[in-house]
């Protein structure tokens, strides 16, 4: 168990790290961030911050030497960077990064545990894509295996002729059959150092242009009927990885049951509602887990909760939300406003 005043290091400097650092401060810990220079909004609420490249081994060593434990808020932290931190001081174990950074490895891992991803094919060449469209049909989605997020690095393919017009990216890719889903949801759990697992309720997630727009509870009968099966898979994933901290699995709710979409070895946008909507938030429980403290209750405290992302220039008028009852604004403090960029979120509760 970390002593009060101990130092937690966070790899990554975005809003997830910012909200983690705020929970760490609440629990009496110091926080040091590490991320390449940029709009690192976690820095604003951290005790110290290393603005260095992921491959700066001297800076990483200096960072790690000051931390009692290290965690991450960003799943694309290079595995070599994570390896610079002694494994017994890093939670979750970096094997979770290796699995989640490659869509192909992730899907194989999930299948090995009995989960059902969308039909997929590995694509290393144009002829692989033609063969995949023949075998799996169209429409489908071509995705980069690595470094994709918020719908980036994805191309909708409606026929093999679409691929002709595509500036075919020269990186490892995967083709996924299009899932005719009824709804989307995620399973978010926390696993402690003793292996105890707690789940939050699963919200219904809606996306616009591949980016999460809202997460709402209750999620409705269709999703509620699929949560048990999805949780069984999520528990297997967490146990197989010896996971410590918050883990997220995203699913498509289909007429044939839950289809695995992807996993995020971290706190997740679809869990931001837990800040006000659950007894213990995903951020607090992640810090509790990595610090070896008892986990907090995850129960939902309201009849209904809706979390809405504030994207791009809408942040300018976001304070207007505060006039509504039981409504809570989280502004991530980002200096640069860009179209499609997550700038904050607002959570509304009905008790
Ligand atoms: P991802 O980054 O892979 O989670 O994709 C972002 C969003 O695109 C998902 O939440 C879905 O709304 C949509 N999407 C991704 N893959 C598929 C698929 N195979 N079938 C249908 N929709 C998808």
Image (spheres, rainbow, N blue to C red):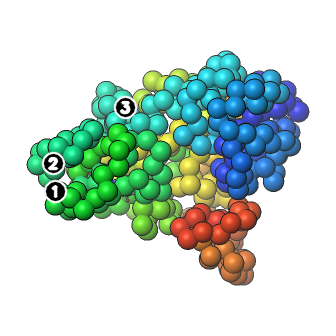
- Residue drawn at the location 62% of the way across and 77% of the way down: 314
Q: CA distance from mark 2 to mark 3?
A: 22 Å
Q: Residue furthest right?
A: 5
> Measured from the top left, where is residue 201 in percent x and y?
51, 51
Mark seen at residue 203: none
Task: Indicate if the residue with disc 1 has its beta carbon within 8 Å of ligand 1.
Answer: no
Left or right: residue 305 versus residue 179 is: right
**Residue at numbered disc 2:** 130
Q: Is residue 94 visible?
A: yes
In the image, residue 108 above or below residue 117: above
- At label 2, counting other C-alpha atoms closer than 10 Å, the crowd grade (few under 14, some 14-19, many 20 or more) is some
Q: Quadrant of the N terminus?
A: top right
Q: Earlier in the sequence, mark 2 or mark 3?
A: 3
Q: Earlier in the sequence, mark 3 or mark 1?
A: 3
Q: Secondary structure at mark 1?
A: loop
Which quadrant of the view contains residue 230? top left
Q: Which of 64 and 286 lies nearest the eye of the viewer?
A: 64
Q: Earlier in the sequence, mark 2 or mark 1?
A: 2
In the image, residue 70 above or below residue 128: above
Q: Quadrant of the C terminus?
A: bottom right
> Measured from the top left, where is residue 191 in percent x and y?
58, 32
- Residue drawn at the location 59% of the way across and 63% of the way down: 342
**Residue at numbered disc 1:** 160
Please count the marks in the image: 3
Q: Which of 327 and 134 lies nearest the eye of the viewer?
A: 134
- Residue drawn at the location 60% of the way across and 58% of the way down: 273
**Residue at numbered disc 3:** 105
- At label 3, counting other C-alpha atoms closer than 10 Å, the crowd grade (few under 14, some 14-19, many 20 or more) is some
Left or right: residue 258 versus residue 8 is: left
Q: CA distance from mark 2 to mark 1?
A: 6 Å
Q: CA distance from mark 3 to mark 1?
A: 25 Å
Q: Are marks 2 and 1 in contact (CB under 8 Å)?
A: yes
């Amino acid at each position: 168990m970390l002593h009060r005043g101990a130092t937690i290091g966070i790899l990554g400097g975005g809003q997830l790290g910012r909200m983690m650092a705020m929970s760490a401060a609440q629990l009496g810990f110091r926080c040091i961030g590490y991320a390449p220079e940029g709009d690192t909004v976690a820095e604003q609420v951290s005790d110290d911050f290393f603005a260095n490249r992921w491959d700066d081994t001297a800076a990483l060593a200096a960072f790690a030497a000051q931390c009692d434990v290290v965690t991450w808020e960003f799943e694309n932290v290079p595995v070599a960077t994570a390896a610079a931190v002694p494994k017994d001081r890093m939670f979750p174990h970096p094997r979770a990064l290796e699995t989640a950074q490659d869509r192909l490895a992730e899907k194989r891992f999930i299948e090995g545990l009995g989960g059902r991803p969308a039909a997929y094919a590995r694509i290393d060449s144009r002829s692989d894509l033609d063969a995949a469209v023949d075998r799996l049909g169209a429409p489908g989605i071509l995705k980069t295996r690595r470094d994709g997020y918020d719908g980036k690095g994805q191309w909708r393919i409606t026929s093999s002729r679409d691929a002709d017009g595509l500036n075919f990216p020269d990186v490892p890719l995967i083709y996924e059959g299009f899932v005719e889903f009824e709804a989307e949801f995620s399973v978010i759990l926390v696993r402690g150092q003793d292996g105890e697992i707690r789940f939050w309720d699963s919200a219904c997630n809606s996306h616009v242009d591949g980016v999460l727009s809202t997460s709402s509870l209750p999620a409705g009968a269709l999703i509620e009927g699929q949560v048990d099966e999805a949780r069984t898979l999520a528990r297997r994933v967490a146990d197989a990885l010896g996971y410590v901290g918050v883990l997220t699995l995203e699913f498509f709710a289909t007429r044939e049951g839950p289809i695995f979409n992807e996993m995020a070895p971290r706190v997740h946008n679809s869990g931001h509602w837990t800040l006000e909507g659950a007894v213990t938030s995903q951020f607090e429980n992640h810090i509790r887990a990595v610090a070896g403290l008892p986990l907090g209750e995850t129960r939902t405290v309201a009849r209904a909760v809706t979390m809405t992302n504030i994207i791009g220039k809408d942040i300018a008028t976001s304070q207007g939300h505060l006039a509504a009852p039981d409504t809570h604004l989280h502004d991530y403090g980002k200096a640069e406003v860009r179209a499609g960029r997550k700038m904050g979120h607002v959570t509304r509760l009905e008790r």
